[in-house]
Image (cartoon, rainbow, N blue to C red):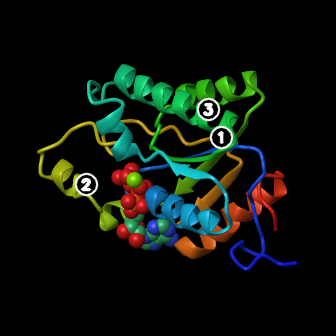
Amino acid sequence: MNDPSRPAASCAGFPGATVWLTGLPSAGKSTIAQALAARLRAEARRTEVLDGDDMRGLLSADLGFSRADRDANVRRVGLVAELLARNGVLALVPVIAPYAQARDAVRERHERSGTAYLEVHVAAPVEVCARRDVKGLYARQREGLLTGLTGVDAPYEEPSRPDLRLDTDRQSAAESVVALRALLIDRGLCTP
Ligand SMILES: Nc1ncnc2c1ncn2[C@@H]1O[C@H](COP(=O)(O)OP(=O)(O)OP(=O)(O)O)[C@@H](O)[C@H]1O
Ligand SMILES: [Mg+2]
């Protein structure tokens, strides 16, 4: 008999995974991760969002924005994500992670434990991101109040072979969520 308290399509029981959403500031990483998380939780999927801003405050408050510090931040967040994912949680990680080498190290950490890892490039032209400017970073950089802004006066190394690219200047956040969920289904990480 159907249990009305359970969702019809349940993602419970699927293996954990890390989904890293990399991209420029204001590209849409957090927006898409939060919307996907809400959808997956409604489907009984154990989901955590490790958001860049939260992680900076909670895990990496001692770190700045040098390359070494950015890499250390990515390494720490990657470690937490892998622990969660290895234990059945879907870890969504909207964190800029500008350097390919650091992202690859996180992927390799997952591979060593046989844990699924997906890299998603949340892509939008820097001009679009600068117009959105959710946190006012682009404006502050223009005014000379901030230096080292990723994609403007600090490097952003685009993923060369992401598992998925979401062009957020051409598709809505809702469309991106559908595409990302389709990838999870395709990889056996979520029920259709
Ligand atoms: N197609 C889209 N997908 C996602 N966000 C979009 C889209 N179109 C417009 N937006 C808007 O762009 C902004 C993206 O902000 P968001 O905080 O998600 O960026 P972010 O990539 O997490 O940036 P940061 O690295 O600074 O945390 C939001 O205000 C969102 O509503
Ligand atoms: Mg964000």
Res 82 label: 3
Which of the image's four quarters has the N terminus? bottom right
Q: Nearer the viewer, residue 179 or 61?
A: 61
Left or right of 165: which side holds 100?
A: left
Mark closer to the chain start, 2 or 1: 2
Where is residue 151? Give x, y as percent.
39, 45
Whether disc 1's CB lies below 8 Å from ligand 1 is answered: no
The kind of residue on which mark 1 rests is Ser
Mark 1 nearby-residue class (10 Å; few <14, some 14–19, many ≥20): few
**At numbered mark 3, what does the secondary structure look like: helix, strand or loop?**
helix
- Name the mark on residue 25: none
The answer, for residue 187, to whether it is visible in the render is: yes
Which residue shows up at 78% across the image and 71% down it?
Answer: 9
Q: Are marks 3 and 2 in contact (CB under 8 Å)?
A: no
Residue bearing mark 1: 160
Q: Nearer the viewer, residue 169 or 112?
A: 112
What is the CA distance from the residue labelled 2 to the residue labelled 1?
Answer: 25 Å
Label 2: few (<14), some (14–19) or many (≥20) C-alpha neighbours in 10 Å: many
Identify the disc placed on residue 138. 2
11 sits to left or right of 151: right
